[in-house]
Image: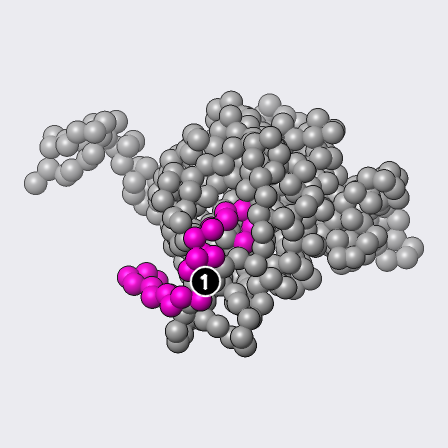
């Protein structure tokens, strides 16, 4: 029986040709060795052309014309309610406290007993010349509404926080895959070799799912997110002990590099060692660069006040937003900020109200600051949670109304970086229960984000576990309606 070799879209029932053999390498275990040989050949050529080793984070060419060169990702962890922020539902006023029955949809572990429709405790306004729908307690964001592109058609697969967080950040509900920031730095490199290409500004308490939300997964360790603290020492042990000078550190690193290089040459398959060596060097350079980035003293006092720095409850997130601007201004490719938790199963007026007061002014100041510095056009800003919330809930304690998890409807917004400012794309039904117009799975959002940064999801792949993997998992569609 003749072997089957798929080649050029036809069934080859003949003896395999050289083309068939080469094609089969991409779909078999032979691709492991073949990819390794190709990588070795490319690296050899690069080493011949350059006197110094090529950094994995060196800038790389784009796949297609880029609208943005960097990204700031604002992660509102816990699932903000679209119904109570940017997607008003007047029908819920009429349906308030009428019994609700969910049929044929996944339920979260929180759902039990009788459930009732719940109206929003917040009033809405039409903001800006675009007439964007924004709840009135977003008083600062409303002033920059014409810079925003709202998307109401996003959907995810999971109803639970950790798996939904993983899917939003990595494309995979079950964790272990590279974060979107890792994919971006893998595809584009970094514009500042003295700083990580992917920096994360988390809460003191990490989000559900932990550091895997910004892990490198199966990509080389160079591309993992580096968490920084926006106040105090940005990284523990960043400052050397007393009496240790930069010259001492340089001598120690040179000796360590010599010993590690000998071991690496004897064990070339140990990629982790090369990544660790690079990490030592990067940490040394960061000791000079990072303290200056976190020194806000030279920033204008009026600018710091606009971020809410020095005032409560805006100081903590204001520092993150100002730091994010300083990082992208200095060439960091991808910065992710966390604010949580928005998981308001009850007392949503109080819970969401407090959270909005923490982030509203800092986010608006970030957008205005980027625009004033001429950075907004080249910086893609994304704001979302891991899912939306339901139009219904159980009634706990009289008026302690809240909302449950809802993967079928959520609102995201984008700014800068080639998006269609001043527009609202997509829609949910009259109760906010499900997206019904311009509906797209989160994989399409990921593909669109990469596209805006000049990356093609189908070309941005990495061979692992016997196949070529990508952020979207198995492909997606660019959401053209979001793009200017």
Is the residue 119 above or below the residue 473 in the image? Answer: below
Q: Nearer the viewer, residue 433 or 313?
A: 433
Q: Quadrant of residue 379?
A: top right
Residue 366 visible in image: yes
Which quarter shows the N terminus? top left
Residue reaching furthest left?
A: 1
Q: Main secondary structure of the magenta part?
A: loop
Is the residue 346 above or below the residue 49 in the image? Answer: below
Q: Position of residue 282 (x, y in %)?
A: 71, 44
Residue range (magenta): 84-108
Residue ID at (53%, 57%) = 120
| Secondary structure state at the residue bearing disc 1 | loop
Whether residue 8 sits left or right of residue 401 in the image: it is: left
Q: Nearer the viewer, residue 170 or 30?
A: 170
Residue reaching furthest right?
A: 243
Q: Position of residue 195 (x, y in %)?
A: 71, 41
Q: Position of residue 289 (x, y in %)?
A: 79, 41
Magenta includes 24?
no
| Residue named by callout 1 | 96
User: What is the number of callouts on the image?
Assistant: 1
Q: Nearer the viewer, residue 5 or 361?
A: 361
């Amino acid at each position: 029986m003749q072997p089957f070799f798929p080649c050029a879209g036809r069934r080859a029932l003949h003896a395999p040709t050289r083309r068939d053999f080469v094609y089969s390498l991409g779909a078999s275990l032979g691709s492991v060795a073949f990819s390794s040989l190709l990588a070795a050949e490319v690296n050899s050529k690069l080493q011949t052309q350059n006197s110094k080793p090529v950094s994995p984070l060196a800038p790389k060419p784009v796949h297609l014309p880029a609208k943005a060169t960097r990204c700031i990702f604002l992660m509102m962890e816990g699932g903000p309610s679209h119904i109570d922020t940017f997607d008003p539902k007047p029908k819920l006023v009429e349906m308030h406290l009428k019994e609700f029955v969910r049929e044929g949809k996944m339920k979260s572990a929180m759902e039990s007993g009788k459930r009732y429709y719940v109206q929003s405790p917040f009033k809405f306004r039409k903001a800006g010349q675009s007439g964007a729908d924004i709840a009135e307690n977003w008083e600062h964001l409303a002033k920059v509404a014409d810079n925003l592109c709202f998307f109401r058609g996003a959907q995810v697969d999971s109803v639970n926080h950790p798996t939904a967080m993983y899917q939003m950040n990595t494309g995979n509900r079950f964790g272990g895959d590279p974060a979107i920031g890792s994919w971006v730095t893998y595809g584009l490199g970094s514009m500042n070799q003295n700083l990580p290409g992917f920096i994360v500004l988390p809460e003191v308490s990490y989000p559900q799912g932990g550091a895997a939300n910004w892990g490198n997964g199966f990509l080389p360790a160079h591309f993992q997110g580096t968490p920084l603290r926006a106040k105090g020492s940005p990284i523990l042990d960043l400052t050397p002990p007393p009496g240790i000078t930069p010259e001492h550190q340089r001598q120690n690193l040179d000796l360590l590099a010599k010993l590690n290089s000998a071991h690496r040459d004897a064990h070339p398959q140990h990629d982790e060692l090369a990544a660790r060596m690079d990490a030592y060097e990067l940490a040394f350079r960061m000791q000079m660069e990072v303290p200056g980035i976190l020194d806000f003293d030279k920033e204008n006092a009026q600018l710091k006040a606009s971020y809410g720095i020095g005032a409560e409850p805006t100081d903590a997130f204001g520092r993150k937003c100002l730091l994010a601007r300083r990082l992208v201004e200095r060439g960091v490719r991808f910065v992710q900020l966390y604010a949580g938790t928005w998981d308001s199963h009850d007392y949503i007026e109080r819970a969401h109200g407090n959270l909005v007061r923490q982030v509203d002014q800092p986010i608006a100041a970030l957008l205005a600051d980027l625009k004033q510095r001429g950075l907004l056009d080249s910086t893609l800003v994304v704001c979302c949670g891991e899912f939306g919330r339901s139009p219904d809930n159980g009634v706990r304690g009289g008026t302690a109304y809240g909302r449950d998890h809802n993967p079928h409807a959520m609102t995201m917004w984008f700014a800068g970086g080639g998006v269609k400012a001043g527009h609202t794309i997509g829609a949910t039904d009259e109760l906010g229960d499900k997206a019904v117009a311009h509906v797209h799975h989160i994989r399409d959002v990921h593909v669109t984000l990469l596209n805006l940064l000049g990356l093609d999801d189908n070309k941005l792949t990495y061979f692992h576990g016997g196949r070529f993997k990508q952020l979207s998992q198995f492909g997606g569609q660019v959401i053209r309606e979001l793009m200017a």
